[in-house]
């Protein structure tokens, strides 16, 4: 069964196709042959603008989790041998403070359908029974529907195309590295409760501790790694989707830096 032929999805793709082509026609007098690429950038900016309230909520949630970190650490020490009790106490603390360990995931989830639609628009030869005109659009001579991996596989990669793909992919990786460095440096440390060495919890208690939101060091390493997953994805998706991802990660970095100033993380107590 062709998922893209399912009537609701076909109608959605047809509307998105008409929207991008209409924006490209409006931008053509100013951007020339790159009008479709400019339309993708414009759509990306509109999506990110609509998600600003979600970004604010994410920054507030991050601030709340940092504020609760010492209390969560104390719970972990207190209930280290009772993982079920530990999880209940932690979730009760989050609930009482009006936050959640999973708060802030909405921006990623909200953008997934947009990336999926752009991906589909630049791989399908036909949409809702008519020819996909977007496949004829290019950016600096490189088809927006082509990918680096696909071009290498079918032998159509040119020097100019490689330079264009490499610029976008390396730019995504660079933004990811800047994001990792900036927010690793700003992450607050969780103060220790005492100078006495902590005893290593056994069995299930150790497992519960490692899976809890208190594993800040592991979480920071995971987030640092995830910054580069987008660059890897850009190798395989169409150039149009890679362009969307580049604008998205650059916007996200700028927005997070701005919101971190508005909602700063609490500084650790020197004592």
Image (spheres, grey):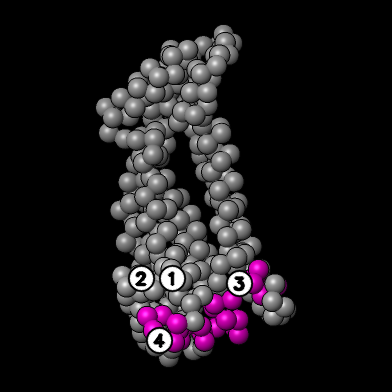
Q: Nearer the viewer, residue 266 or 177?
A: 177
Which callout, 4 or 1, points at the residue further toward the start of the chain? 1
**Badge 4 is on which residue?**
130
- The magenta segment: 126-152
Would you say the residues marked 2 and 1 are in contact, meaning their CB atoms lie under 8 Å apart? yes
The image position of residue 227, as x and y in percent, is 56, 51
Q: CA distance from mark 3 to mark 2?
A: 26 Å
Q: CA distance from mark 3 to mark 4?
A: 23 Å
Q: Could you tell me which secondary element the residue under label 2 belongs to?
A: loop
* Residue at the spot 40% in from the left edge and 46% down from the top edge: 105
Q: Could you tell me which secondary element the residue under label 1 belongs to?
A: loop
Q: Could you tell me which secondary element the residue under label 4 belongs to?
A: strand
Give the label, 4 or 1, closer to the camera: 1
* Residue at the spot 42% in from the left edge and 53% down from the top edge: 108
Q: Is residue 129 above or below residue 183?
A: below
On the rendered structure, is 84 left or right of 170? left
Q: CA distance from mark 4 to mark 1?
A: 16 Å
On the rendered structure, is 18 left or right of 125? left
């Amino acid at each position: 069964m062709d998922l893209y032929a399912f009537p609701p999805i076909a109608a959605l793709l047809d509307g998105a196709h008409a929207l991008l082509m209409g924006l490209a026609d409006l931008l053509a007098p100013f951007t020339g042959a790159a009008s479709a690429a400019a339309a993708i950038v414009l759509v990306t900016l509109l999506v990110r603008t609509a998600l600003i309230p979600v970004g604010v909520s994410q920054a507030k949630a991050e601030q709340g989790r940092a504020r609760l970190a010492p209390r969560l650490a104390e719970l972990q020490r207190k209930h280290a041998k009772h993982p079920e009790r530990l999880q209940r106490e932690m979730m009760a603390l989050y609930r009482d403070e009006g936050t959640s360990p999973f708060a802030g995931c909405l921006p990623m989830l909200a953008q997934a359908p947009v990336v999926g639609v752009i991906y589909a628009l630049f791989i399908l030869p036909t949409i809702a029974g008519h020819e996909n005109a977007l496949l004829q659009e290019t950016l600096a001579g490189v088809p927006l529907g082509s990918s680096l991996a696909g071009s290498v596989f079918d032998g159509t990669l040119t020097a100019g195309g490689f330079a264009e793909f490499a610029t976008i992919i390396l730019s995504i990786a660079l933004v990811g590295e800047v994001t990792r460095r900036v927010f690793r440096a700003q992450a607050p440390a969780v103060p220790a409760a005492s100078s006495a060495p902590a005893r290593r919890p056994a069995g299930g208690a150790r497992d519960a501790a490692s899976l809890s939101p208190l594993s800040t060091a592991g979480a920071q390493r995971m987030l640092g790694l995830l910054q580069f997953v987008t660059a890897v994805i850009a190798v395989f998706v169409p150039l149009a989707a890679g362009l969307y991802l580049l604008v998205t990660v650059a916007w996200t970095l700028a927005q997070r830096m701005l919101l971190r100033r508005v909602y700063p993380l609490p500084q650790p107590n020197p004592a």
